Image: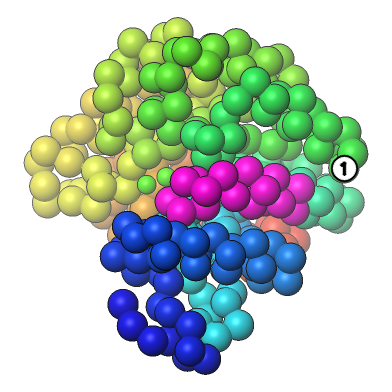
């Protein structure tokens, strides 16, 4: 790390995450970012593998820092989680994604849902009520919204995770299990928790078709998902070979640079309105 533009410190590197001064710096920068509306959302299409139609979008957070330009969520989410600011940030994300979903519905787009990433810190008893509140304020049908959660959240049984998930799915909002395969003891959770979709982590998609292990893992996840009656989506699909493999294996949905990078709401809307087929 070192002096950055304007005399500030470069705050988005890993070293700074580990010092108190570094974390304080990021924390105040994040507070300012919330006040000054430096955050924005990009949307990456989720595609039905059988029809090539867009059936959803994942909202992905971006921080446009006035001096440093675009900062990736991987570089500030960890600090936001440690400082608790993630609650305000994710509340903003949910609010903004739902407002956007409302606009798209008003354009007559009704066959897709918007997915929002939920941080472990946010996954508390108050989440169902907050979600219900946002839905009603924006007049959003619950099936238009999907929450992407990770395996690590499921392991925290002290928090009454199952109860929270039940309340959310009772609202009609669907849950998908993100980065699937990278966490621990996922299998027992699969039948206990009301999860709609498994999202195979990009790390298993990357090596397809050359890496026999990646191929085996991806096929195994897909066939297990099918037998347990979950939907299954692959993230990080970048090539035609990967798409062919996933199609053959029976994967339901795909997402990745092959189809589209995460794009602005305006660009995403263009694809929707044109009824773009991949
Ligand atoms: P994630 O939820 O696993 O999101 C997928 C990441 O993979 C995104 O990175 C996306 O841009 C990227 N990606 C999509 N397709 C491809 C591809 O074909 N190839 C490659 N190499 N990458 C692809 P991004 O946007 O930088 O987000 C990184 C992580 O930050 C996310 O991982 C998620 O854990 C977190 N994140 C993003 N937005 C939010 C948010 O609003 N709230 C919270 N709590 N976390 C967020
Ligand atoms: Ca995600
Ligand atoms: Ca993911
Ligand atoms: Ca991932």
> Was residue 84 drawn as part of the magenta stretch in this picture?
yes
Please give the range of residues in magenta: 78-96
Q: Is residue 243 left or right of residue 169?
A: left
Q: Is residue 2 visible?
A: yes
Question: Residue 102's x, y, as percent?
Answer: 83, 48
Looking at the rendered image, the quarter that the N terminus falls into is: bottom left
- Residue drawn 60% across the image and 25% down it: 124
Q: Which residue is mark 1?
A: 138
- Residue drawn 60% across the image and 11% down it: 163
- Of residues 44 and 11, the one nearer the viewer is 11
Residue at the bottom extreme of this rendering: 6
Examine the rendered structure and indicate whether residue 77 appears above or below residue 148: below
How many residues crowd mark 1 within 10 Å: few (<14), some (14–19), many (20+)?
some
Kindly report the secondary structure that dominates the magenta region of the rendered protein.
helix
Question: Residue 173's x, y, as percent?
Answer: 68, 27
Question: Residue 18's x, y, as percent?
Answer: 32, 57
- Residue drawn 30% across the image and 30% down it: 183
Question: Residue 73's x, y, as percent?
Answer: 48, 59
Q: Is residue 58 left or right of residue 184?
A: right
Quadrant in which residue 274 is drawn: bottom right
Secondary structure beneath label 1: loop
């Amino acid at each position: 790390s070192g002096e950055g533009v304007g005399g500030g410190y470069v705050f988005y590197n890993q070293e700074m995450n580990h010092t108190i001064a570094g974390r304080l710096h990021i924390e105040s920068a994040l507070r300012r970012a919330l006040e000054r509306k430096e955050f924005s959302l990009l949307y990456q299409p989720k595609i039905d593998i059988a029809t090539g139609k867009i059936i959803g979008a994942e909202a992905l957070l971006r921080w446009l820092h006035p001096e440093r330009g675009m900062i990736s969520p991987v570089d500030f989410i960890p600090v936001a989680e440690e400082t608790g600011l993630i609650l305000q940030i994710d509340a903003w994300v949910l609010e903004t994604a739902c407002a956007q979903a409302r606009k798209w519905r008003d354009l007559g787009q009704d066959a897709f849902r918007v997915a929002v990433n939920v941080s472990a810190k946010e996954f508390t008893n108050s989440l169902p009520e907050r979600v219900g509140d946002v839905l009603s304020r924006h007049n959003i049908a619950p099936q238009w919204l999907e929450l992407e959660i990770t395996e690590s959240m499921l392991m925290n049984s002290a928090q009454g995770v199952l109860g929270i998930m039940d309340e959310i799915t009772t609202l009609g909002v669907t849950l998908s299990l993100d980065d699937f395969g990278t966490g621990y003891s996922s299998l027992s959770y699969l039948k206990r928790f009301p999860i709609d979709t498994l999202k195979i982590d990009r790390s298993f998609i990357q090596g397809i078709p050359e890496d026999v292990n990646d191929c085996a893992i991806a096929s195994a996840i897909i066939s297990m998902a099918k037998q347990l009656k979950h939907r299954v989506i692959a993230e990080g699909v970048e090539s035609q070979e990967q798409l062919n493999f996933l199609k053959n294996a029976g994967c339901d949905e795909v997402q990745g640079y092959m189809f589209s990078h995460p794009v602005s709401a305006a660009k995403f809307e263009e694809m929707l309105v044109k009824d773009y087929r991949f």
